[in-house]
Amino acid sequence: MMSVSSNSTDKRLNPIDVTNLSDEDQQINTWMRLVAEQQDKAAFAQLFKWFTPKIKAHGMKRFRQEAQALELVQETMLLVWRKAALFNPDKGKATTWVYTVMRNHCFDMLRKMQSQKEDTMSDDLWPMLECDHSSGEQHDHLMSRELLSHIESLPQQQKLVVEAIYIKEMTQQELATHLGVPLGTVKSRLRLAMSKLKSKLEASHD
């Protein structure tokens, strides 16, 4: 492990009061400076080794899946490598800066996952209802009486979103424009509605 020098160069790491940093924090700041100024791979390897278990633990807590926790580690540390020069020691410790990078990317991953969940949720829902072809009725399964009954029971705003998107076949963006609300509001209402519909359908088929 590389040692921390006490020369004037290292004092510049935190001109506010570098003496208040623990030895460990000074070491991490030193590695960060080497990465920022020299693209030092050995220093980055030390940062990677130190932060990996901590970022992975955060990822496991948020995602509960090792693959996504490891993705958070890889993407966070890649951002650290690319943006190390943006770290300002005058505004805090390197550890605080890295954890901020981690949290921001974690939020991005969660938003992406939620968006994908919303876009594919209908694939999980609609196949639960099968058309009774033996009855001779020629109607789309989306218009089944059971499903329509559950849709009718939804709160008005959620009902409107489901009908517009899955019956009138409007896109989420078209509906947001039509209603004059943010796209995120449409997505939120749709997510709540689909969750309720799925619960009702599962209960009725148990």
Image (spheres, rainbow, N blue to C red):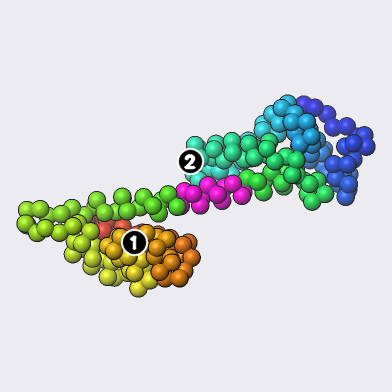
The picture quadrant where one finds residue 56 is top right
Residue 28 in sight in this render: no
Instruction: Measure the C-alpha gap from mark 1 to mark 2.
Output: 34 Å
Q: Earlier in the sequence, mark 1 or mark 2?
A: 2
Q: Position of residue 62 (x, y in %)?
A: 53, 48
Secondary structure under tag 1 reads loop
| Residue 104 falls left or right of residue 2 | left
Percent position (x, y) of residue 126? 26, 54
Q: Image quarter for residue 28?
A: top right
What type of secondary structure mainly makes up the magenta span?
helix
- Is residue 158 among the parts visible in the rendering? yes
Q: Residue at x 45, y 70 (%)?
A: 180
Kind of residue sitting beneath label 2: Gln
Judged by depth in the image, the label closer to the viewer, 1 or 2, is 1
Rendering quarter of residue 54: top right
The residue singled out by tag 2 in the image is: 65
Q: Is residue 9 above or below residue 152?
A: above
Q: Which residues are magenta?
A: 103-114
Q: Is residue 103 above or below residue 188?
A: above
Q: Position of residue 70 (x, y in %)?
A: 55, 36
- Badge 1 is on which residue? 170
Callout 1 amino acid: Met
